[in-house]
Image (spheres, grey):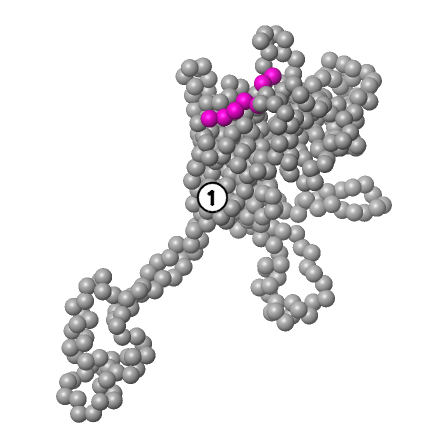
Amino acid sequence: MTLCTDSSSALQWKFSQVFGERSIGEDVQDSNKRVKLANGSLAGMGTIKLTSLFDIISAMEFQKSGDYLAVGDRGGRIVIFERKDEKDSLNQWHSRNELEQLDFTAMLHPIFYYKTEFQSHEPEFDYLKSLEIEEKINKVRWCATPNGSLFILSTNDKTVKLWKVKDHKPKKVKGLNPNPFVDSENVLLAASSFVSGQDTPSVANGYAVESTEKIDNMSPSQYGPAKRANIGETVSTRCRKVYAHAHDYNINSISNNSDGETFISVDDLRINLWNLDVSDQCFNIIDMKPSNMEDLTEVITAAEFHPIHCNLLAYSSSRGFIRLVDLRQSAICDHKARILQNGESSGFKSFFTEIVSSISDIKFASDGRHLLSRDYMNLKLWDMRMETSPVAIFKIHEHLRPKVRE
């Protein structure tokens, strides 16, 4: 979306790209819908339609570079979009000399195009607990790309999977060199063209008859190197690791570490630390489950690794608290923690006060100094050095605030 910077009016937003729109008379079952790209196309290059309840968007994540966008839906699928800058299309219509004479830089919006999609999770059934596990994607996270391939972490309620997405350029054989011993230059300099008095008859292509007989009798293994040609690009996906059987409660978030080797999976009461290369073992670093479940007062709602320091971790709770922990202090980090809490919040408290104060998600800024949290009524910006209050509060859904007091 694009921000309109008109000082005479309030901030307004407009769409720079729309992946699909609801048809006239179409029944939308949810306000957050995923758009199914028919025939693998986008931006007017095919039919776009809404298919079913399973096409509702449940998670999305931009890659750190901004070149790719991963979207997960309730059907367990992940769709990947790739960014194509408008400057690429500008180069197609202008020559290099014309582009060098331009006295401005084209400031055009990037366009995302459909790249591929794959089925990440399937519906399962836990026979021990008589529990049906949905295929809905709860979170997707991009991993580091050391060799040019794309790696994605995806999770449903119980299982985390690591996927590898790689581009392939398949080639087909265009032709074979029938005579590996005589190249094209030697053909032009055939002996029959320069040696006089040759009694051996020759054929039209300049080869001697006995030479052509040898060529005809050659086996396929004696042919020269094959000529290959690209026939397009394809994308392959493969599941590299499956991290399962580690959570008793539903997973609500996952987060990659800046070290590129570990990640965390989070449910309502526990946070587990995984190594990307080890799928059968994890370490429990935070456990908020009380000995008596009647004493339970809050649950974990989200967690995020620090973008720079691999030892720092932040997680939020349903009571509106944000806790910062250092993994170097203790193996179990649920007691020694700094708490970010809005100490200045006061006023009328109702039955809905604790419900609307529950934090749904948190996100570190790229500098690692600030943290953004979202609850039902506010968007708060925190400074890691200020524990008592956020540095800025952006109010949301103000039209609902009078109803909360009722």
Query: Which residue is at 59% across, 7% downward?
Result: 292
Q: In the shown orientation, is residue 386 left or right of residue 30?
A: right
Can you name the residue that lies furthest to the bottom here? Answer: 197
Does 286 lie within the magenta span? yes
> Does residue 399 appear in this view?
no
Does 283 lie within the magenta span? yes
Residue segment shown in magenta: 281-288
Q: Position of residue 226 (x, y in %)?
A: 31, 63
SS type, badge 1: strand
Q: Split into 4 quadrants, where in the image is the N terminus?
A: top right
Query: Which residue is at 58% across, 43% downward?
Result: 63
Total number of numbered labels?
Answer: 1
199 to 258, vertically: above or below: below
Q: In the shown orientation, is residue 159 left or right of residue 403?
A: left
Instruction: Pick the residue in front: 184 or 338.
Output: 338
Q: Quadrant of residue 354?
A: top right
183 to 193, vertically: above or below: above
Q: Quadrant of residue 395?
A: top right
Q: Where is residue 190 in the image (x, y as percent from the top left)?
A: 26, 83
| Location of mark 1 (residue) | 165
Q: In the shown orientation, is residue 368 left or right of residue 401?
A: left
370 to 1, vertically: above or below: above
